[in-house]
Image (cartoon, rainbow, N blue to C red):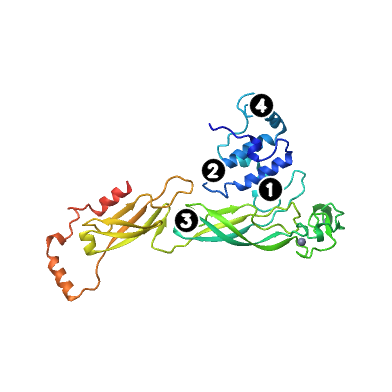
Amino acid sequence: MAQKRDYYEVLGVSKQANASEIKKAYRKIAIKYHPDKNQGDKQAEDKFKEAAEAYEVLSNADKRAKYDRFGHEAPGGGGFGGNYSNMEDIFDQFGDIFGDFFGGGGGGRTRGGRARKKGSNLRIRVKLTLEEVANGVEKKIKVKRQNICSPCQGSGAENGTAFSECPSCGGTGRVRQVMNTMLGQMVSEGTCPTCNGSGKRIQTVCKSCRGEGVVAEEEVLSINIPAGVEEGMQLSMSGKGNYPPRGGQDGVPGDLLIVIEETNEGPLKRDGKNVHYDLFLSFPDAALGTQVEVPTINGKVRITIEAGTQSGKILRLKGKGIKDLQGYGIGDQLIHINVWTPTELNKEERKQLEKLRSSSNFSPDPDKGDRTFFDRMKEFFT
Ligand SMILES: [Zn+2]
Ligand SMILES: [Zn+2]
């Protein structure tokens, strides 16, 4: 087993760091190496797990004290830290943290119970050619999103200070409603509609955002798309969605969801990990043999066509297909041979062919020489 790194070093905090600094540092790392953002990246996954383990220990006062005293060799056997064999374990363990940052929609809740606002997710579509799918690509994409208004720090109030207590709820953010129904009076409690639960009222509206707390911004993001993605797949970048309106400083931006689209242009067609190509050969080339260039996802390659090549034959270029997203192997390119029958003949050509018609070499005989189509298929699929 590899030497374990110091947990403080893993999270990039000092030995004196307090609980909130540790949490903050962990969040930062977790967001950066989150598997949604780094699909297929083994190194990112390891970093993610390493940070989760460090956080598990350093966020627990008792475990941290033991670790400070004994290092990785904790007494009582087993050392520290869970052995996270899969990502689900980590999400189970730290559900509350990821709820805030990766949960879909809605506001997360801090431990104090006060709602944190989460912004809405943004969705963009990215068109990829087969070459880009096969090799992975870095795409620069202009994204228009609501970002925090910096003059008011997302509050919507001028300078972030001009607040007074909300008169509807007296600053609690909650209101009780008494309704007269047929069954008598019913009391319900809910979020104050006047202040949206903040308990505050803006006195002077921020001029930059007109009280919204957010401003529209265009940002050019560079998105790393791993090799082997597929049509309809969705990648996500945490925190690159919209900032919540009037979310204040501790608002949580939504996520940017990147939906993959494959353009279906060009002579190469994808089928899972394999790539198919139809090659048309003239009859003389198929009969006499030749060399031809065929396109692949990594440029052209020269292949040899043997003399006597039948229509329907499939040639395989090993390893010239699409890489598996999880890193398990690579597909092939399959070249389907189609022998082209001429549709127009001049007098001279017709005469030559008439002469060949009676030759025994030209009458089909699948049992002799080249194997039959079905034999080839059997060989191909086994
Ligand atoms: Zn209110
Ligand atoms: Zn503002």
Dot 3 or dot 1: first in sequence order is 1
Residue corresponding to mark 2:
43
Q: Position of residue 125 (x, y in %)?
A: 55, 61
Dot 1 or dot 4: first in sequence order is 4
Q: CA distance from mark 4 to mark 3?
A: 48 Å
Q: Position of residue 185 (x, y in %)?
A: 85, 54
Residue corresponding to mark 1:
100
Identity of the residue drawn at 68% across and 48% down = 100
Q: Amino acid at mark 4?
A: Phe
Q: Residues within 10 Å of mark 3 (few under 14, many from 20)?
A: many
Please identify, in this view, whether the residue under mark 4 or under mark 3 is nearer the observer: 4
Q: Residues within 10 Å of mark 1 (few under 14, many from 20)?
A: many
Q: Quadrant of residue 53?
A: top right
Dot 2 or dot 4: first in sequence order is 2
Residue corresponding to mark 3:
133
Residue contact at pointers 3 and 1, CB within 8 angstroms: no
Dot 2 or dot 1: first in sequence order is 2
Dot 3 or dot 2: first in sequence order is 2
